Amino acid sequence: MSSFDFDVAIVGSGPAGIAAATALSNAGVENIVVYEREATVGGIPQHTHHPSFGLRVFKRPMSGPKFIAALRRRCPKVRFETNTTITALRRGGELELASTSGLHNIRARHIILATGARETPRHGRLVSGLRPQGVTTTGALQQLIYTANQRPFTKPIIVGTELVSFSALWTLRHAEIKPLAMIEAGARISAYRPSTLLARAMGVPIHYNCEITDIAGRDTLSQITVCSQDSDVRTIACDGLIFTGSFIGENTIAMGSHLNLNAPNRIPQVDQNWITSDPGVSAIGNAIHPADTGDKCYLEGSNAGAYVAQLLAGKTTVNATFAEIRQGEGIKMTTPSILRDEPKGPSKFDLSFHVTKVFRGRVRVRRGGQIMHEKAISCLPTRRITLRNIRLQADMPIEVSLNSSRE
């Protein structure tokens, strides 16, 4: 009798997790379980009701709940366990679980971490002031409005201009709430420029080059203090403050485990096939590159699940050794962050990365000091840049760096 409870255990039921389960099921893997800590399957899209999903996967726009429902219809045989929190990941494919039935352990031949990402809340941004009611994030806002049917405030302010910031704007529109303004620290929005059309249509101004320096209100938010780059300080009366974006991977499980983490951002290291430092564990989706769209995460999860199916079937193997992909100044994260040679030799792979600030120049990939790949780029911090079809041998560290000079 096998000592494993499952062939594959997937942690997280967002688009990436559902996609991996679907690919495994389609490949003939039957003993699959997907664990979800919330009461419903779907992750962030389950609480996002505007039609920003489905274009890549289904070729038509869909709301988050409809997108998740359509994805689940693709994997009818997969087992989902909700209200289950993973409290520990250990070597040998062991997971410690906390559910309504208590604490227990399971073992799987392979584990896939699809734990997603979360927005950085107020305390993570070191904004000073009191702690009144009315300060929230986009995710919490969507649950209040769409799930709890509440109207939490009437005069809110949105902090940030990432894609999710305009998702918050759409959510407020659904509740017939008009924000007073959007606050952006930079000189332009972080999302694509056409996103400003929604703010313009709603009559919501965007204040650029501004940061919040103080929050006031003993029980309920009453006002905020905003400072511009030219040191102009003013207060704005409001009853809601929504911190949006600045996503970080939800990697609590990985950080408490034996997995190698990328030092600058505490994201688990993954190779070109989404395998971590432990060949029996994968990490996929926004857990390793926060934050991409649900469609992109689904497509990645499909590829990762198909690769794990090949591993379980003995059609490929994972090299025990790997080379680190080191990120230079100005680079927030790379995917992959380690590289393994394939069974037949050097790897051919796509390398994606995010920058920490607006950049225009050249990106270089070096191995042993030699430039192996170079490309001119122009990018914003929230955009994922991809260098395609790189072929390298994983026998020494690889460095990805930015160069703004014309040399």
Image: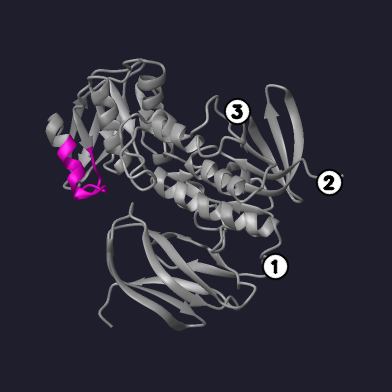
* Amino acid of disc 1: Ala
Determine whether the residue tagged by mark 1 lies in a helix, strand or loop. loop
Q: Secondary structure at mark 3?
A: loop
Residue 159 visible from this viewpoint: no
Please determine whether, in this image, residue 160 is positioned above or below residue 220: below
Verify whether residue 196 appears in magenta. Answer: yes
Q: Nearer the viewer, residue 66 or 170?
A: 66
Kind of element beneath mark 2? loop
Residue at position x 55%, y 54% in the image: 304
Q: Which mark is residue 82?
A: 3
Residue nearest the viewer, comparing 353 with 219: 353
Residue 202, image quadrant: top left
- How many residues crowd around disc 3 within 10 Å: few (fewer than 14), some, or many (20 or more)? some
**Disc marking residue 320:** 1
Task: Looking at the picture, tell me which residue is in the foreground, 61 or 213.
Answer: 61
Q: Quadrant of the C terminus?
A: bottom left
Residue that mark 2 sits on: 2
* Numbered marks: total: 3
Q: Is residue 141 magenta?
A: no
The x and y percentages for residue 98 are: 69, 29
Q: Position of residue 371 (x, y in %)?
A: 42, 82
